[in-house]
Image (cartoon, helix red, strand yellow):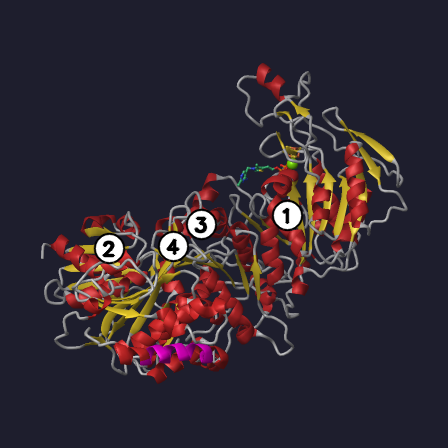
Amino acid sequence: MSSRAQAIKENAIGLSKKDYDGSVSTLCKGCGHNSIANQIIQVAYELSIRPNEIIKLSGIGCSSKSPAYFLGMSHGFNALHGRMPSVGTGALMANHHLRAIGVSGDGDTGSIGIGQFKHLMRRNVRMVYLVENNGVYGLTKGQFSATAEQGLELKYAGQNEFPQIDICTEALIAGCGFVARSFAGDAKQVRELLKAALSHRGTAVIDIISPCVAFNNDDSSPKSYSYGREHEKPLQEIGYVPFAEEITIGDYDPGDLKVVDLHDGSRISLRKVEQDYDPTDRLAAINRLQAANANQEFITGLIYIDNERPNLAEVSHLTDTPLAHLRNSEIRPSEEQLSDFLKAYA
Amino acid sequence: MDVMEREVAQRPASPIVNDFSLVAATANGTGSQTANLTLLRSFFKMGIPVHGKNIFPSNIQGLPTWYHIRVSHEGFIARRPPEILVAFNPTTIYEDAKDLPSGGVCIYDSGIKGLPERNDITYYALPVSELIKDIDVPVQRKPYIANMVYVGALAFLLKIPLEVVEEALSVQFGGRQKLVASNLPVVTKTYDWCKENLQKTDPYEVAPLNKTDGLIMMTGNEAGALGSIFGGVSVSAWYPITPSTSFIDALKEFLPKLRKTDDGKATYTVIQAEDELAAIGMTLGAGWAGARSVTATSGPGISLMSEFAGLGYFAEIPAVIWDIQRVGPSTGMPTRTGQGDVTFTYYLGHGDTKNVILFPSSIEDCFDFGVAAHDLADVLQTPIFVLSDLDLGMNNWMGKPFSYPSTPINHGKVLSAEELEARGGFARYKDVDGDGIPYRTLPGTNHPQAAYFTRGTGHNDAAVYSERSSDWVENADRLSRKFDTARTLVPAPVTDLNPDAKVGVIAFGTTRYAIEEAKAHLAESLPFSFMRLCALPINDEVRTFVAAHDRIYVIELNRDGQVHAILQTEMPDLATKLISLAFMDGMPLTAKWVEERLMEEENV
Ligand SMILES: Cc1ncc(C[n+]2csc(CCOP(=O)(O)OP(=O)(O)O)c2C)c(N)n1
Ligand code: SF4
Ligand SMILES: [Mg+2]
């Protein structure tokens, strides 16, 4: 990266990695969402994806801003809070040759958008659906999201009294044919899962734990909200964001447990699914997730796959030419057809 | 008073031919619709101008339903309080008969008790259970069959030839002979019984005319769906709601007939969404990706669509949204008609939003505007709203056979890869042509400069995120310019100018029928000019029309005078000339109301 003279390597379609960049991220430095954007860039480059064949979609949130920060040569649509799935569904019905990468947050998916999320999977719309899951509403500054663990205490949000919604379990119950979980700092696993998801026939959900560096609310920390409030009056609401390093973790083996320290001093436990784990058994997958939740672990990897169910474009028996590209004569019936049709109404 | 006494009402002076209003009062879910539509078709087949309105409850079975049929040799089809009542609903029989005007006619099921005692109307009693006793149909079909009794009685009393009834019945059953065979005997049996047992003493009757030659009969929703198809729609997403559901039902019925490819694949899709939030999201998503898209809904759905409407306006995405208006707020009267969504839809979306609205008033308009809406959406790159109403959408109307679109499909300013190459790229929101309408590219366009980022956040003309005040102002002003361009592209108002009139009326949509009738009645006593708006925003013709009169009455079916307020805002200098005549009770307007209100205002 350091040398400008470094030879620019091109992929199979003659694009360099830079060609897959987006605009400069305005997310906090160290935000997990940035790592994920970087892996999308890497994967698109490695797979020699044609940027014009991709559409990027998102809802609203810090996570949902990130499509601006990757694949600048692909059309993007930053939609409404929780309602990216419907926009994607319409766009992919208009042009089913496109491949869609949807980026959402845990608030965007788990609360306001849970209905659209479920129905996207139910219809099996062909979309890679990433949930950049940080357990909080980042953009509105640290409220609990529905994926926050029950009992968790954050200075700003207080204590979370309610059980968490598990994105992967919700996906499995909705009939999703590709359900995976990863951690933003596990670049290699994120890339592997992204590659697999991009070749999936229908909706592919990857729930990616993606730490938020801003809402580090340890009371005694000079970086906490309460501290800021007491010592710096008046405090601009988001004027103060801690500088943090991106958390990255090294590779770990299937079946192993990896404990990760987060910015706020809390920890999460990741367990990679075992080598002999069978991701084609839906009931077993649901049980595995439940067991992991009981142990306060996140299992990571491909949790469930079923590539058999036809996607929405397929069940709609669409003609091969995308609807958006039909000729005028194909979308407007003839004058004779009109007069014939009206005979029944005379 | 017994039955015999009732039947000897006064004998008529002379017959009243092809000029009456009748209502069939039945209970919802008893299948009376077949009987009603058979009558409607019979008059239509006889060449007499006719229109039917179903006044029905929000209920599947049991609540009262009234079907109004207006027959008029003069061609007036507005609602008129009925002179003839078919009283087949025990729960409303008293009120229904009480409401009849003096000289009215009441045809009732002799098995139903509770009629008011009136000697200024003619009663005809029909032994319904007796007449259907021997008809060979399963017991559960008896109530359906019973409705055919009033068809037979009216055929006799009004002098509708039985062949015509048979033909209408056949159309009604889509040619299914078995159904015709079980219904027709009830009609003929009743007819014969009436001939034997009734003495006609009322003046109302029909006689063949030639005023429906070449016309078609259809509901507004069917016409709108057909228009959408000839407008090139490919994607439709919707969520069920009365009175818009039959729009999508028609779309789903017509598309396979008109748009299948040779290999049986579809060039269209209709998605039943999980709610209206998703329906509009899908519609916009499809428009963004380059397919013509439509959704149909009613007030509650429009409410849910508001945030997406604002996004569509601001991010400049084509889409067509039909609002078949019903009575609100909230669930309101979901099966009654109104024009109460205009203000809300015109400004739908938070912040500085203004939307283009089309106002169909007939089935021809529904078809034509159905086509035009898709061109307008593409050309203006914005959501286009078509505000129909329950009365137009769900009822059957006469109309001229629709004209095939006279201009080719216009996709607006969409740049292909070749055009991008020639131009050396583009800026998504740049006003290159001075009409406020920028250029767009479709996802999938194979050119390194084709992509842009669609967003609801502030952006500069290259679609890049911006919170600069100057970028915001520039963009907002351009959108306003685009709205001014829309004025020149939307369907122009239809004006019936009376050069001598001091007074004018402005209205839109289905109130036209009551106004046109009132205009004919007031031709001598209170001549006025009439302008029917076909769209918002208005153009200069409206201003000229207002300026040419001393007073303008804006007539509409809502409480607060919504279009009146919009017109005042659009023409502040002429605002004092505009007088609101707004009324909303859930029923289609009558000419009587229009006449009385105008005369009262004008002291005539
Ligand atoms: C209709 C609507 N309601 C509320 C908001 C405010 N809002 C913006 S982002 C957000 C939460 C985002 O949380 P999440 O999806 O977890 O994204 P993160 O910022 O954590 O990545 C909310 C509530 C909005 N934009 N739109
Ligand atoms: S607030 Fe949190 S989620 Fe948002 S950009 Fe900063 S670190 Fe990321
Ligand atoms: Mg979040």
Disc 3 versus disc 2: nearer the observer: 3
The residue carrying mark 2 is: B554
Between A1 and A247, the residue placed more toward the observer is A247
Q: CA distance from mark 4 to mark 1?
A: 31 Å
User: Residue A227: x percent and y percent?
Assistant: 62, 17
Query: How far apart in space, not on screen, are marks 2 and 4 (Cα)?
Result: 20 Å
- Mark nearer the N terminus (2 vs 4): 4
Q: Which residue is mark 1?
A: A117
- Residue beneath disc 3: B300
Label 1 crowd (10 A; few <14 / some 14-19 / many >=20)? many
| Disc 3 + disc 4, Cβ < 8 Å | no
Per the image, label 3 sits on a secondary structure element best described as: helix
Residue B422 falls in which quadrant of the image? bottom right
Using the rendered image, report if marks 3 and 2 lie on a common chain.
yes
Residue A229 position by quadrant: top right
Share a chain, discs 2 and 4? yes
Name the residue: 68% across, 16% down.
Answer: A220
Residue stretch rendered in magenta on the structure: B180-192
Pointer 1 residue Cβ closer than 8 Å to ligand 1:
no
Q: Amino acid at mark 4?
A: Arg
Few, some or many C-alpha atoms within 10 Å of disc 3 (few <14, some 14-19, many ≥20)?
many
Residue B326: assigned label:
4
